[in-house]
Image (cartoon, rainbow, N blue to C red):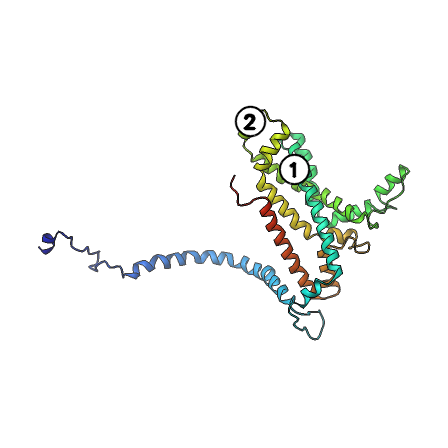
Amino acid sequence: MTHQLTGSAPPRTPRGGAPASGRDTGLEARPTRRRARRFQPAWLFMAPSLLILGAFVVFPILRSLYYSFFDWTVGAVSQPFVGFGNYTKLFHDQQFWNALRITLEYTIVSVVLLVVLGFVAALLLQRDTLANRIVRSVFFFPTIVSLVTIGLVWKFLLDPDIGLVGGITAALGLPSIAWLQSTALALPTIIFVSVWKSIGFAMILFVAGLKGVPAERYEADELDGANRWQTVWRITLPSIRPTMLFTSMILTIQSFQVFDLVYVMTGGGPVFHTDTLVNLLYRDGFVNYQTGYASAISWVLFVIIMLISLLQLRLFRYDDVD
């Protein structure tokens, strides 16, 4: 009767007779426990992969960071803590600066050539004709071959005495050229072989990017009277900017980590004219057994790659929305 006079509704009583209350945490906790039980099988399925990743990727990375702060030499009685001593020694090492200069030269020249030539090849071969598919396959085939095999083949081809290139020059009456023994030609020769191997990879990435450009953009540009070059500059290049960013970043990281090709073809010679950072790291870590110093080189290389990748993201305006 009191509820009828005041106009308020009586409180609802749920089933079971218990009054509804905001303090009933039991009902709220049930979905949380149910969600927790739901995610447990997923963690069990991921556990083997996470263990392998942690044991063979994460742990070695952290361990190398730990080694970089010690004068860690394989077989030594004591491994003294030196703090940033390895990094200080690194920046006063002329071999390090020489290897960094050579790595930068190799990376800049090879990446620019691969991006330009890969884009041009993709423009010429983007149509899905039988002839274009065959040519694209021929270009892409060296990409699936290991760098060691490529290096060995080209080392014999360029040999001035028994190589095919030396035989052709001799047949033409030209003097033989020691491509890999010359301090002026060794690095350009390695860059040529690297570009020859990877141009198919860059081409395939650009072909995929070109196929994602809407045809309406080209039709609208043709109606405006644009020629082929203007269409490429105003439509194609802005449309494949994400592909250009991805391709340049992947090629840059690969170029900074070049080792197999240099090790097989020249071993860092002649007179350290092809000595890259990874080649220096290998020599200090696995030949001289200076694990701490080699670990410092690896972390400096990691920082350099990160900074250049951030610069590329900035130059390609990754955060912009077209």
- Near-viewer residue (34 or 288): 288
Q: Residues within 10 Å of mark 1 (few under 14, many from 20)?
A: many
- In the rendered view, tell whether residue 98 sits above or below residue 78: above
**Percent of width and height locating residue 227:** 62, 26
In the rendered view, does 233 fall on the left or right side of 264?
A: left
Query: Badge 2: few (under 14), some or many (20 or more) residues near its Cα, within 10 Å?
Result: few
Secondary-structure class at tag 2: helix
Relative to 21, say whether 85 is above or below.
below
User: Which quarter of the figure is the N terminus placed in?
Assistant: bottom left
Q: Which residue is mark 1?
A: 119
Quarter location, residue 279? bottom right
Question: Looking at the picture, which amino acid does disc 1 mark?
Answer: Phe
- Mark closest to the chain's N terminus, 2 or 1: 1
Against 96, residue 251 (above or below) is above
Q: Position of residue 317 (x, y in %)?
A: 56, 44
Residue 161 lies left or right of residue 219; in this view the side is right
- Residue positioned 62% across, 47% down in the render: 249
CA distance separating discs 2 and 1: 21 Å
Amino acid, disc 2:
Glu
For residue 174, which quarter of the picture?
top right
Q: Whole-percent x and y of residue 118?
A: 67, 39
Which residue is painted at 68% across and 45% down in the image? 111
Mark 1: which secondary structure? helix
Q: Nearer the viewer, residue 54 or 169?
A: 169
Tag shown at residue 219: 2
Which residue is more in the foreground, 267 or 130? 267
